[in-house]
């Protein structure tokens, strides 16, 4: 029994480890180029579909590409409607693993010939530097996939002698549904549709099951692959939940269509197999898998926008969720995580600036306490998130970007405290002596408008002034405010020596002047650091100017 069970379980384990290593290595090796390509080619549902299919086929993991996609949606790099096309494409790209297994893994004993790849990959991982270490991981993973298939194939032959899986029910919708559920459960247990499909292909190749049963198992695996995403989405961001729902609905609908129309699909598969002169077997099974996923894509893709709106109604975004896009899953991709935190900080800054601008126009000057509480929670979340973003020791550009964001967060926390003091101290800023200082504040807030400095390049109005010019103007306003506040304090303190009875009033006035000076300073520094961080994001050079505190 151990001679049968151990190779069977070990083969599945080697295949799963190989898939994980190959996916992780390729994603790390491709690096920013892959992510830039995904963002660039998700402009329309069709482009997103193509991008999702090719990316998943390349990295051999729909889960990995979907997690990356969730990061893009959370970071605001792509819209959810664009993500729908990507999700559908990822389902089609996931069939690439089946083609590799059917064409190469089962026809040739690649497990023996790829053994040197495992050794060479391990050496690269240990001795190489930079991206070649990641390539070593991918090479080792590629070799382990085929070693696992060879081991699984041997175990499956022995298992077929003991367990007659062909005795499972055949024919009819009920039998197909039962076998589909078995495939779904098998995928949930293995936590990988690729492993479940590889196991099914191996069973078909060793004639442990027949073609109809294998087809129903593949449909179950296609539906079961969504369970992992659903589990990950529990307690995750809105983007993650919506993407998981879209993935579940698409695969579930496609699987149901495939089961209901299974006899027709099998007939089409048999016809196409004859045309390309392929005998019914593993290649025909992968062709069947590709066919029913393609039909689902053809039915859903033209209605991607409507599908997106349907999912958004199922999973509405909370109105007061300020930093809800900062999910721990984004930490796997530092560039995307920093983009997400950048947009969260820009959103928090815009909220605080707008609330302060509104408070200046009202009497008394107050900022809603609930808003200040929400921004405090968002800032705490953002600070913790940014601090946990993992960076390579030699990645200077991303390190500088994170430092700039941490400085911006610090000044946002201080600005939020100043606005709390505005409520608590009941400052009266309507007297003429504060008019010049308030004018500087109004101009600073106008310059920091969301359509100008605090907007990502793709969101910025084409007629907006250059951000560097805006930043220079803000620095001039902040310097002028500081000089004016210093002059006011000197004048007030000198005048108080001649009027001892007014000392208390003078001290209150100087405190207000100092409050105005520091508040304006925080506004300018927030914009300075957010501007610096945005420049680091856009920079293509390997070295950028240091950030001054």
Image: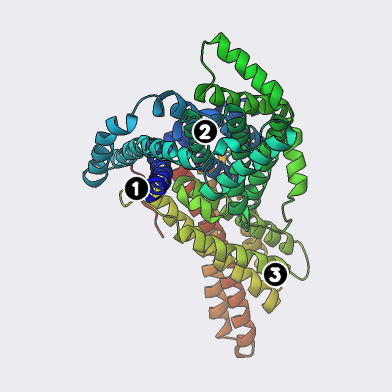
* Quarter of the image where one finds residue 187: top right
Badge 2: residue crowd in 10 Å (few <14, some 14–19, many ≥20)? many
Badge 1: residue crowd in 10 Å (few <14, some 14–19, many ≥20)? few
How is this picture coloured? Answer: rainbow
SS under mark 2: helix
Residue shown at 76% from the left, 34% from the top: 306
- For the C terminus, the image quarter is bottom left
Residue shown at 57% from the left, 34% from the top: 90
For the residues carrying marks 1 and 2, which lies nearer the camera in this image?
2
* Quarter of the image where one finds residue 223: top right
Q: Nearer the viewer, residue 173 or 525?
A: 173
Q: Which residue is mark 2?
A: 38
Residue shown at 57% from the left, 86% from the top: 498
Q: Nearer the viewer, residue 168 or 34?
A: 168
Query: Residue 221 in the image: x percent, y percent?
Result: 59, 39
Dot placed on the residue nearer the N-terminal end, 1 or 2: 2
Residue 374 visible in the current orientation: yes
Placement of 452 over or under 528, stated as above or below? above
Dot placed on the residue nearer the N-terminal end, 2 or 3: 2
SS under mark 3: loop
Query: Residue 279 in the image: x percent, y percent?
Result: 52, 16
Q: Which residue is mark 1?
A: 395
């Amino acid at each position: 029994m151990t001679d049968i069970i151990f190779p069977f379980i070990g083969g599945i384990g080697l295949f799963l480890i190989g898939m994980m290593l190959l996916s992780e290595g390729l994603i790390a090796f491709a690096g920013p180029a892959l992510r830039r390509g995904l963002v660039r080619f998700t402009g329309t549902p069709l482009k997103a579909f193509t991008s999702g299919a090719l990316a998943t086929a390349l990295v051999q993991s729909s889960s990995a590409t979907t997690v990356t996609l969730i990061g893009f949606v959370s970071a605001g790099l792509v819209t959810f409607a664009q993500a729908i096309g990507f999700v559908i494409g990822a389902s089609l790209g996931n069939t690439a693993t089946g083609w590799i297994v059917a064409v190469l893994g089962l026809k040739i004993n690649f497990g023996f010939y790829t053994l040197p790849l495992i050794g060479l990959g391990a050496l690269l991982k240990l001795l190489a530097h930079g991206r070649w270490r990641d390539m070593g991981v991918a090479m080792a993973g590629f070799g382990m996939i085929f070693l696992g298939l060879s081991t699984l194939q041997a175990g499956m032959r022995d298992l077929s002698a003991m367990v007659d899986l062909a005795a499972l029910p055949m024919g009819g919708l009920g039998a197909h549904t039962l076998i589909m559920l078995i495939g779904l459960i098998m995928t949930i247990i293995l936590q990988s549709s690729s492993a479940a499909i590889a196991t099914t292909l191996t069973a078909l190749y060793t004639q442990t099951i027949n073609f109809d049963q294998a087809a129903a198992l593949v449909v179950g695996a296609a539906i079961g692959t969504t369970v992992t995403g659903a589990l990950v989405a529990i307690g995750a961001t809105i983007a993650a939940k919506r993407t998981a729902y879209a993935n579940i609905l698409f695969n579930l609908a496609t699987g149901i269509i495939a089961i209901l129309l299974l006899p027709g699909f099998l007939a089409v598969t048999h016809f196409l197999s004859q045309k390309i002169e392929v005998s019914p077997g593993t290649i025909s099974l992968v062709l069947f898998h590709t066919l029913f996923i393609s039909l689902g894509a053809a039915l859903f893709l033209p209605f991607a926008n409507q599908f997106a709106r349907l999912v958004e109604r199922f999973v509405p975004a909370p109105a007061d969720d300020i930093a809800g896009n900062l999910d721990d899953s984004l930490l796997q991709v530092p560039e995307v995580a920093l983009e997400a935190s950048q947009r969260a900080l820009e959103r928090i800054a815009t909220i605080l600036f707008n609330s302060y601008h509104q408070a200046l126009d009202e009497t008394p000057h107050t900022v809603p306490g609930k808003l200040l509480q929400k921004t405090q929670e968002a800032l705490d979340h953002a600070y913790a998130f940014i601090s946990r973003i993992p960076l390579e020791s030699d990645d200077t550009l991303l390190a500088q970007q994170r430092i700039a964001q941490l400085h911006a967060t610090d000044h946002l926390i201080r600005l939020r405290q100043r606005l709390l003091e505005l409520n608590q101290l009941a400052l009266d800023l309507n007297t003429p002596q504060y008019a010049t200082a308030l004018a500087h504040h109004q101009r600073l807030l106008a310059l920091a408008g969301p359509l100008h400095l605090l907007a990502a390049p793709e969101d910025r109005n084409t007629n907006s002034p250059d951000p560097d010019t805006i930043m220079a103007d803000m620095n001039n306003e902040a310097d002028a405010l500081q000089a004016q506040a210093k002059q006011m304090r000197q004048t007030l303190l000198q005048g108080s020596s001649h009027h001892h009875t007014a000392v208390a009033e003078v001290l209150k006035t100087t405190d207000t002047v100092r409050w105005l000076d520091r508040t304006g300073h925080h506004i300018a520094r927030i914009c300075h650091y957010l501007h610096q961080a945005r420049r680091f994001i856009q920079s293509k050079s390997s070295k950028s100017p240091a950030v001054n505190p």
